[in-house]
Image (tube, rainbow, N blue to C red):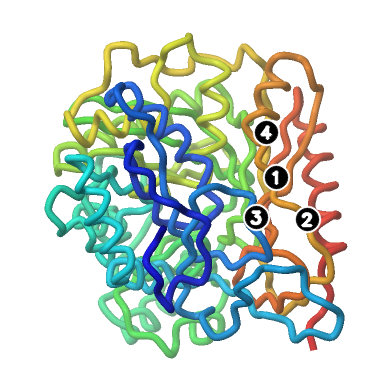
Amino acid sequence: MVPEDDEILFTNFTYNPDYYYFLYVGELKTYSLNYFVQEALAHRIPNRPIRFIAIIPDICIQYNYANIIVINPRGEEEFISDHAFVQPGKKPRRCWRIESARFMSAVSNNPAIRTLIDRILEHQNQLYINLYESVLEMTLDQIDRVSILGPDKYIARHFNNKIIQYKALEGIVPLADHKVCEDRDCLLRTTAELRNRWTDGIFVSGAYSAAGINSAVTFNQEQVEKKFGATNDVYLISRFIPHQLDPTVLAVVANEQDVYIAGIADQVIVDGNRFIGSKFPSTATRQQQEKMHEYTVRVGRMLGEKGYRGIFGCDYLIDNTGEVFFLEINARKQGTTLEFCYTLEQTLPEGAPMLPELEYYAVTEGRFPRSTAEMKDNHRNIHWGTYNYKIQTKKLTTGYIPQNPYERETFRKVANGELLKDFVILEHPGTNFIVMPGTFLARVVSVARNRDDVDEGLCQGVGFIQQTITEAE
């Protein structure tokens, strides 16, 4: 058992010394990616069954997952320990998306987790930690024989900086017209000066931003003042390019030369910069996809020269004339990583390594295994789409959608023709929660044989989610 600790809100984990464990620290939405890590480690550690322990911040009414430990500093006072369905009249709990830095720091400093690690290391010579993103606040790897199974966190932090990216990629990939502003006064002055030349709008981003946070497309100076007037950062400003397509490329880099391209999906962007999901296959032309493939390899080799090893992504836009422009590097796993694993599993030759195994080899050996194969075409005719249902105003959940563990099975059945289409709803917290703005309430994943059926599944899934919420008082 995990030692008792007031910061651990729930656990169903019992330690078994016969197993070889690794840790996953991150949100519930990428829990299933660990099965691929588990399978990758099984190829390298054949003498013991591999299991993972998932340390997550998600507070739910119940967990349909094995080996869970819940730590959430924001939820300690409001958590109901028995997870029974809430009775009528009981006070709702609150549900927020905790900041990654705060969560990673809480896990890293938790005495019970450190005691658990000591116990695990009594029975195995190495403990890997799998992360969605390598961040500085994760310090458990400072323990002897504990290591992060992903990119170096200092290099990842360096290359998640938009300013660093654009300086490093000048002349390597096509960039929109852009400038760097060292502070708020420079931002306000420079955007005002450029407004008459960059008439389609000006995109403003802090050095670090993701999913629309700390960035905005602005069409007048009032919008700049409102969004950034109270902050003082280093800003990247670029000419907004009207476009209809926002492709994203998922990749893995093993060294200075070897870059693996997993696939290209189309991001669904609303309000100019707010990401809500992705769709595969991309509707970009073959020539445009070849360009993005080439550009991403260039980016990967640049990262590889600087010591980055592991999964990363590149976002692009295709303007209204068909030209491809680079937008940003995501020096981490992307939201498409799990669905691309399911797609590659059904598409690649038997025995070809999946993305977590490629990352394992990249991180531990600086190479890819000999059996590595890229997806050349979508010969199984797999189409999929995702929708992240993010709350914009405070809501109350009045219904519950049980956690669905069968997303992988859905991909297999559609690829084999057992199903023409299906969708799953994932990570809904349960009933009687006050869900705060900025929180992901649930995800929809729709799989089919064509884009129209994918869209129908997403629409139905979103409809089911909407039936579980009402405005909170």
- Answer above or below: position of 246 versus 90: above
Disc on res. 404: 1
Picture quadrant of residue 388: bottom right
Left or right for 313, reference 450: left
User: Mark 2 near mark 1, Cβ–Cβ under 8 Å?
Assistant: yes
Disc 2 crowd, CA 10 A, few/some/many (<14, 14-19, 20+): some
Q: Could you tell me the amino acid type at mark 4?
A: Trp
User: Mark 1 near mark 3, Cβ–Cβ under 8 Å?
Assistant: no
Q: Which residue is mark 2?
A: 401
Kindly state the secondary structure of the residue where label 2 is placed: loop
Q: In whole angstroms, how far apart are the C-alphas of marks 2 and 4?
A: 21 Å
- Answer above or below: position of 65 versus 73: above
Q: Could you tell me the amino acid type at mark 1?
A: Asn
Q: Position of residue 176 (x, y in %)?
A: 40, 52
Kindly state the secondary structure of the residue where label 4 is placed: strand
Q: Earlier in the sequence, mark 1 or mark 3?
A: 1
Q: In front: 86, or 268?
A: 86
Q: Which residue is mark 4?
A: 384
Q: In whole angstroms, how far apart are the C-alphas of marks 4 and 3?
A: 18 Å
Q: Earlier in the sequence, mark 1 or mark 4?
A: 4
Q: Could you tell me the amino acid type at mark 2?
A: Ile
Kindly state the secondary structure of the residue where label 3 is placed: loop
